[in-house]
């Protein structure tokens, strides 16, 4: 395929993916907004007032970057895993496999679809948060970079999950038993400086901690990372490293036909 | 140039099942080719390998002289495939499904729209373009599959049982359409369980059984191998019993329908004369269907028993 043909094919996949999640917007866009609103009301307004300061900020202010990232992560992941597995299940993935599309374009199309939903939900959550708190951004370029790269990473994760999934149960196991605990223990609602030393060290093995804290730093200008002796650059390298690793694994399995060819 | 060239193609599934045992097959450009075989013979596996849905164990596949391993993308541009089962997102609109398929091939939005419109009109689904595919009947979904496979104007079209379970009206309209695009130059490979469909449409034929090609010849040559042929005569006047001295193997199916089997080399003129001399008047005559079926069963049984082919 020529570069122009590849570009058109990519736009087609992206259009289809965006059209898919927009068509079911009551399932894809509204629930995260409602859930985040409840978090703000319960943890921010009701409980947050009693908590006072967290990491040197109002609790509501501290929580907002974490909640935005939580929405971006879970929606990027779930968009790709449900869409790609759905296509596998309905065999409509064959539509793509019989075309001249190279594997990297299939992967890129789905990842961009996941990023599109992640960013859209992230934007909705940000708008909702503005009703509750007058938020200002410390470093726009860093916040945009972190949110996009994290979205790419979890879209790749969703793709990998979908490649291996053989039933609908398989696409809910990783989000439920691995991602949710890592997100909640990654410092969305609390500063890990509150933890005893041992658990702080354990928390450092959680990659989501770096993403949430890098984003929190870009919004608030401070996070747990510097307090624990890590620079923001370290978090950025970690995100990029995981993206390269996950993309390579996805391409390898696509090339091998794992889960899509017999 | 060959539209399709397969050499020593093998496929062994995990668990040791040998679906293809080193098949060789060539299909000329412009041909209308039948690939027949019983269930599980290896037809769909062969199509799967050609269309990259199945990973081959070994062997070579070329589409219009382009090796699918060396120039995967280029080879795929020439190919359109209608799968055995519905393989599109049934929650999408018909028009979107077909236009998107054109997009996957890298066609511009304008080309995609024009091609989609052309084939939707040709296949009588234009008025369904804004309907969700899941609301269509089985026959209509088949048409969507065909339009989708053609939207990139492929030079080689493979249809895996395209008329399975569809009514006779659609089947005939599809036959006419396929004949038309074949006459315009598209090479067509057809698998079907309706042998009269293969006999009617295809010029060349291969029969696959247990992962091996057991016959590969022209339809005409295959049919000449029939040792005998049965004709059905509709009688002008009812007949209660058959005359004794017909000299042919004949069965009176009902008082107005006579079936006569004529051996190879026996002319048709004689039977008319014999029937006329016996006072039997004929209103019409037709070939009994199932000529190819007889041959097919013979070849498959022979392969099963390890006998002569």
Image (cartoon, grey):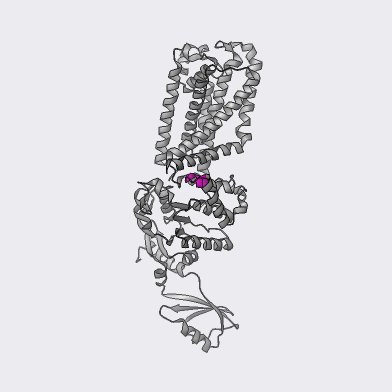
x, y percentage for residue A144? 52, 24
Q: Quadrant of the C terminus of chain B?
A: bottom left
Which residue of the protein is positioned furthest toward the bottom in this rendering? B277
Say which quarter of the image contains residue A188.
top right
Query: Residue A235 appears in which quarter of the rendering?
Result: top left
Which quadrant of the rendered structure holds the N terminus of chain B?
bottom left
User: Where A83 falls versus B135 (above or below)?
Assistant: above
The answer to if A3 sits in the magenta stretch is no
**Residue sitting at 46 percent across and 53 percent down?**
B154
Question: For the point 52% across and 38% down, which residue is it?
Answer: A14
Any part of residue A258 in sight: no
Above/below status of B1 relative to A176: below
Residue B124 in the image: x percent, y percent? 59, 57
Q: Is residue B300 left or right of residue A172?
A: left
- Please name whichever residue, A207 or B71, is drawn nearer the observer in this view of the structure: B71
The one of B38 and A64 positioned closer to us in this rendering: A64
User: What is the x, y in percent for residue A101?
Assistant: 44, 43
């Amino acid at each position: 395929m020529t570069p122009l043909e590849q570009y058109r094919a990519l736009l087609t996949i992206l259009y289809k993916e965006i059209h898919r999640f927009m068509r079911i917007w009551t399932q894809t866009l509204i629930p995260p907004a409602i859930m985040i609103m409840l978090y703000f009301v319960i943890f921010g307004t009701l409980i947050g007032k009693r908590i006072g300061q967290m990491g040197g900020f109002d609790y509501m202010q501290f929580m907002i970057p974490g909640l935005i990232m939580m929405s971006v992560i879970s929606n990027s992941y779930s968009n790709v895993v449900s869409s790609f597995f759905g296509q596998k299940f309905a065999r409509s993935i064959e539509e793509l496999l019989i075309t001249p599309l190279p594997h990297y374009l299939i992967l890129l199309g789905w990842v961009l679809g996941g990023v599109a939903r992640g960013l859209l939900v992230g934007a909705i959550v940000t708008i909702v948060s503005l009703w509750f708190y007058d938020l200002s951004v410390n470093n726009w370029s860093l916040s945009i970079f972190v949110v996009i790269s994290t979205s790419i990473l979890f879209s790749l994760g969703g793709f990998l999950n979908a490649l291996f999934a053989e039933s609908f149960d398989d696409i809910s196991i990783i989000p439920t038993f691995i991602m949710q605990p890592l997100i909640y223990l990654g410092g969305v609602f609390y500063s890990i400086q509150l933890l005893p030393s041992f658990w702080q060290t354990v928390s450092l093995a959680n990659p989501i901690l770096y993403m949430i804290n890098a984003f929190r730093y870009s919004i608030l200008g401070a996070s747990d990372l510097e307090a624990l002796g890590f620079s923001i650059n370290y978090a950025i390298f970690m995100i990029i490293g995981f993206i390269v690793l996950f993309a390579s694994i996805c391409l390898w399995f696509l090339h091998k036909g794992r889960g899509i060819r017999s | 140039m060959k539209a399709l060239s397969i050499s020593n193609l093998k496929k062994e599934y995990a668990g040791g099942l040998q679906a293809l045992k080193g098949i060789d097959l060539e299909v000329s450009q412009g041909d209308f080719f039948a690939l027949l075989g019983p269930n599980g013979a290896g037809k769909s596996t062969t199509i799967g390998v050609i269309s990259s849905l199945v990973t081959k164990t070994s062997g070579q596949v070329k589409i219009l002289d382009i090796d699918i391993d060396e120039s995967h993308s280029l080879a795929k541009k020439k190919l359109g495939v209608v799968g055995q089962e519905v393989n599109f997102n049934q929650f999408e609109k018909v028009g979107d499904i077909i236009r998107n398929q054109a997009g996957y091939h890298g066609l511009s939005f304008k080309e995609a729209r024009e091609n989609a419109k052309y084939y939707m009109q040709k296949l009588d689904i234009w008025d369904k373009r804004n309907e969700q595919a899941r609301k269509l009947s089985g026959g209509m979904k088949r048409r969507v599959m065909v339009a989708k496979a053609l939207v990139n104007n492929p030079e080689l079209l493979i249809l895996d049982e395209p008329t399975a379970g569809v009514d006779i009206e659609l089947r005939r309209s599809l036959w006419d359409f396929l004949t038309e695009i074949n006459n315009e130059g598209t090479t067509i490979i057809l698998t079907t369980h309706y042998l009269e469909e293969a006999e009617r449409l295809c010029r060349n034929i291969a029969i696959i059984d247990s992962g091996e090609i057991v016959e590969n010849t022209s339809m005409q040559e295959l049919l000449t191998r029939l040792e005998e042929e049965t004709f059905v005569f509709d009688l002008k006047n009812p007949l209660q019993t058959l005359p004794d001295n017909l000299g042919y193997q004949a069965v009176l199916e009902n008082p107005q329908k006579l079936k006569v089997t004529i051996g190879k080399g026996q002319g048709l003129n004689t039977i008319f004369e014999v029937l006329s001399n016996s006072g039997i008047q004929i209103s019409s005559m037709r070939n009994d269907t199932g000529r190819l079926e007889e041959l097919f069963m013979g070849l498959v049984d022979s392969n099963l028993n390890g006998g002569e082919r």
